[in-house]
Amino acid sequence: MTPEQIEKINRTAALPDDCIIDDQLSALMLDMSIWTLRRNNPVPAVQLSARKRGRRLGDLRKRIRGELAPSAA
């Protein structure tokens, strides 16, 4: 990971669980590509606009800790 990507991930520590982050940052946090994130759907998506989706930060944190099972696509 680049220093910029690490900084983005570190900034999420101060954000509340209800915050919605885009798929690019979600994929970085889960250490997978955006394509894999969308295909496997480990965390339920939230439609942000016609072309953009995001994930709830609290659900991502639970998934990283292993408390949330992958959702069925």
Image (cartoon, rainbow, N blue to C red):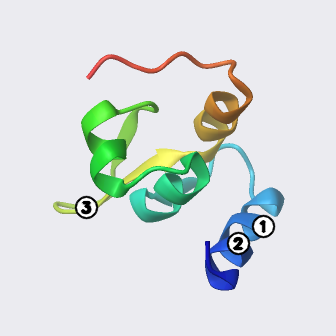
Residue carrying label 1: 10
Say few, some or many: other residues with alpha carbon within 10 Å of mark 1 (under 14 / 14 to 19 / 20 or more). few
Which residue lies at the image location 47% right of the left edge and 46% below the top edge? 55
Say few, some or many: other residues with alpha carbon within 10 Å of mark 2 (under 14 / 14 to 19 / 20 or more). few
- Left or right of residue 4: residue 49: left
Which residue lies at the image location 62% right of the left edge and 80% below the top edge? 2
Give the image location of residue 13, x and y in percent. Answer: 81, 58
Question: Disc 1 versus disc 3: distance between alpha carbons?
Answer: 26 Å
Badge 2 vs badge 1, beta-carbon distance below 8 Å: yes
Badge 2 vs badge 3, beta-carbon distance below 8 Å: no
Rendered-image quadrant of the N terminus:
bottom right
Circle 2 sits in a helix, a strand or a loop, which is it?
A: helix
Circle 1 sits in a helix, a strand or a loop, which is it?
A: helix
Which residue lies at the image location 16% right of the left edge and 60% below the top edge? 50
Question: Disc 2 versus disc 1: distance between alpha carbons?
Answer: 6 Å
Circle 3 sits in a helix, a strand or a loop, which is it?
A: loop
- Disc 1 marks a residue whose amino acid type is Asn
Q: Does 24 appear above or below 69?
A: below
Q: Which mark is residue 49?
A: 3
Say few, some or many: other residues with alpha carbon within 10 Å of mark 3 (under 14 / 14 to 19 / 20 or more). few
Give the image location of residue 16, x and y in percent. Answer: 74, 51
Residue carrying label 2: 6
